Image: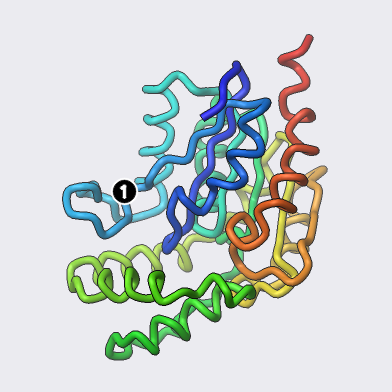
Amino acid sequence: MGSGENCVLFLHGLFGTPEHWRCVMERLSEDYRVVAPQLPIDPMPGRRESGINEIRDLSEYVAELIEHLGLGPLVLCGNSLGGLISIDLCAQHPNLAKGLILAGSAGLFERSPIGGSRPRPSRKFIRDTVSGIVHRQELVTDELVDDWYTSVMDRDYVRFILRMSRATRDRTVEKELENLDLPTMIVWGSEDQITPVSTAYDFRERIRGSRLEFIDECGHAPNWECPEQFAELTAGFLPECFADSKK
């Protein structure tokens, strides 16, 4: 979507989809090329890659995609797991990134949306889980609950998701954050219950020169819950990342 030499790559979280970036991308596509790939962690048969077991596998997958499509160097924008992947990619392939946007990012502290339990799947359990992730409850529709319920009935997929969830919580990036040297904006929902507000301040303290922005009445997925505000913040930040492109 969009066009031009300056590109922004959007990475969704463990339970997210590229569709959660659509409104943000439509706003930014007026000035930038915007791409939101489906990470190989979704339940669709044949789409999920074999051999994906840890964060590094996903960051290398994204790095190969960037190089294959000739997109870099670009700005990486990730929510939750997508933020953690973006951090790891910046650390391993600094030549591919001109800027970084973290939204409710994993990598320092993250609560499990299911509290570490493995209850019997039910639509009520799914609804309660999603309701704990987002603050804006109007997003928790019957259709969304049905989609998630169908996914968790696949035992192989549930085992995979639990493995990736553990890998996300076990991976910390303190050292990588201290070594980052690129424009960075941190965007956080004021009502995030998965990665609480204190985590946002921790990210800002660890990333030199980073900028921290909060969105009120917003939970763990600001790009999905509050796309207009998120897009506005992103549009204001991107010129700093691409300043050298205009020289």
The location of residue 80, given as percent across then percent down, is: 54, 59
The location of residue 124, given as percent across then percent down, is: 39, 89
Q: Is residue 158 left or right of residue 173?
A: left
Residue of label 1 = 40
The location of residue 109, given as percent across then percent down, is: 60, 69
Task: Name the quarter where the C terminus is drawn.
Answer: top right
- Look at label 1 and name its amino acid: Pro
Q: Residue at x 46, y 74 (%)?
A: 141
Label 1 Cα neighbours within 10 Å, binned few <14 / some 14-19 / many ≥20? some
Residue at the top extreme of this rendering: 247
The location of residue 4, given as percent across then percent down, is: 60, 17
Question: Relative to 121, is 221 above or below?
Answer: above
Q: Is residue 26 left or right of residue 186?
A: left
Q: How is the image coloured?
A: rainbow
Q: Residue at x 39, y 87 (%)?
A: 125
Q: Residue at x 45, y 59 (%)?
A: 16
Q: Is residue 172 left or right of residue 56?
A: right
Please tell me whether mark 1 sits on a helix, a strand or a loop: loop
Question: Relative to 182, is 216 above or below?
Answer: below
Res 28 → quadrant = top right
Q: Residue at x 45, y 19 (%)?
A: 70
